[in-house]
Amino acid sequence: MPQTGENKDIFMLENYIGGKFIPCSAYIDSYDPSTGEVYCKVPDSGPKEVEAAVKAAKEAFPEWSAKSPAERAQILNKVADLLEARLEEFAQAESKDQGKTITFAHTVDIPRSAYNFRFFASSGLHHTTECSQMDHMGCVNYTVRCPVGVAGLISPWNLPLYLLTWKIAPAIATGNTVVAKPSEMTSVTAWMLCKLLKDAGVPDGVVNLVFGTGPRAGDALVSHPDVPLVSFTGSTATARLITERSAPFCKKLSLELGGKNPAIVFADANLDVCISTTVRSSFSNQGEICLCTSRIFVERSIFSEFLERFVAAARQWKTGVPSDPKNQNGALVSKEHLEKVRSYVALARAEGAQVHCGEGVDVLEVPDKNVGGYYMLPTVISGMKDSSRLMQEEIFGPVTCVTPFDLEEEVITRANGVRYGLAATVWSQDVGRVHRVARRLESGLVWTNCWMVRDLNLPFGGMKNSGVGREGGKDSYHFFTEVKCITIKH
Ligand code: NAD
């Protein structure tokens, strides 16, 4: 690991271009969210570095795309093997870089990153294309799917390696080559992955990693004429910029964006399971998951009981230093983000809502060396209007709002009354109602009586401002390939 001159504990990342680790002329500070101290420097890449990476990816494309899916699958499985073998090291690094708990990194981020490679290695072997049975005008017609070329992949900071590999694995399994840009706030595990890709036998230039900020490195990638496809996960505001920058080139775009996810709790719900799951769905990973619940609608007859029990359970959700395996939440990703999340709680107070626990109510104690870290306790709010920014905007932190409802029709309208449509949960033991409500929710994913159960074969993505397109099994295959219709005259 290269060290900086000033402090031997601070290490510097390098870009990975054409199979080589290449230092950059400028660097950005990267903070340890558990202490608030700089601990690593991330390349501040721009158009020059992106140009070199795109060139390397273009050069690698003919050979990689000509390999059979089985040959590529073998290499992807090797990446998964190596990642699983180094799970502990990657989990430690992800936790330190992002602020998430070691337990979450250990049980969710890194196992799922490895599984992403394994899943797309295998699913890539089982797709078929169409052939028309009709002998139309003496011709037979069939379709083939071809890789698109150089894929531009841009990922966020909340599930750094998990979401990056969710893009890299299907992109290369289908024969594309890649230039990826992870979030500048959480680049360490992506950089560690580069070494592992090389060891697994991914040919030089097939995967290139360029580190840096969105406006410099990200923008250069999105607006590069030789990158015909962009898969982006991040905020709706950035997606708008990316759409504008891609439009002149008619790029293929997949956009996985923010959410303002409702949970709807009917009076017949199994409250024990509902409360423990909804605490998890609201606060897991410090509430920094696009699928986290942030509006809880509870049928009025059980509202008081629910609120009391939910607040008590939220208080049990243990927050503290990420390296302690007993903690369920660690630190938020950055000082700016912590301040943004706190500002919503201040807004709640200013609007006359009640803050039942967490921010400004309870006190969190951390060891002296962690007092500069970005910690926030799970916070539960009630008494706000549906039109409040608290109920309309994505907060993306450990804050959730609880509100009563009376009628099924009413709650569907209110749950749909936001610009987002990513994930919803419905809690009821009435199977007819569950189906009725799930069908009418404007949401790409609806979980009933559970949360975040994912079958990677099925489409993942959002409606409305939560996204464009779907990823997962067949959807990723379709996104990362172009279909071609071939007509043979006989
Ligand atoms: P962000 O939009 O700020 O950044 C995401 C990525 O885009 C980063 O790598 C960033 O550097 C890059 N970027 C920023 N500006 C850019 C530009 N002008 N051109 C190109 N790239 C640019 O998002 P974030 O704060 O990192 O992530 C949080 C957001 O991501 C939340 O809204 C969350 O809901 C969303 N998210 C969505 C999903 C999903 O699957 N739907 C999953 C995780 C996170």
Image (spheres, rainbow, N blue to C red):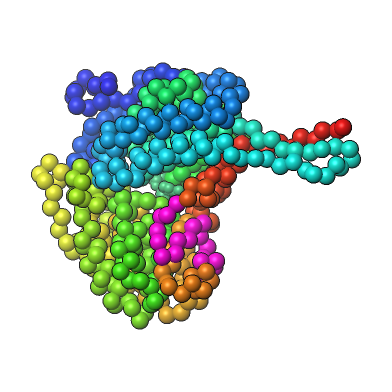
Residue drawn where x is 19% and y is 27% of the image:
9
Residue 352: % across, % down: 28, 71
Residue 424: horizontal and vertical position, in percent? 45, 62
The residue segment tinted magenta is 437-454
Residue 172: x, y in percent?
52, 31
User: Quarter of the image holding residue 175?
Assistant: top right
In-image side of 170 versus 352 (left or right): right
At 56% from the left and 48% from the top, the residue drawn is 469
Work out whether residue 145 or residue 94 is closer to the camera in this orientation and state it.
Answer: 145
Observer-nearest of 10 and 482: 482
Task: Based on the picture, tell me whether residue 447 belongs to the magenta stretch.
Answer: yes
- Quarter of the image with the C terminus is top right
Residue at screen point 18% across, 24% down: 7
Determine the quadrant in which ligand 1 lies: top left
Q: Is residue 215 above or below residue 470?
A: above
Assess whether residue 44 is covered by the magenta stretch.
Answer: no
Quarter of the view holding residue 35: top left
> Looking at the image, which residue is at 74% across and 41% down?
131
Quadrant in the picture for the N terminus: top left
Where does the image place residue 411, in percent across and percent down from the top left? Answer: 46, 73
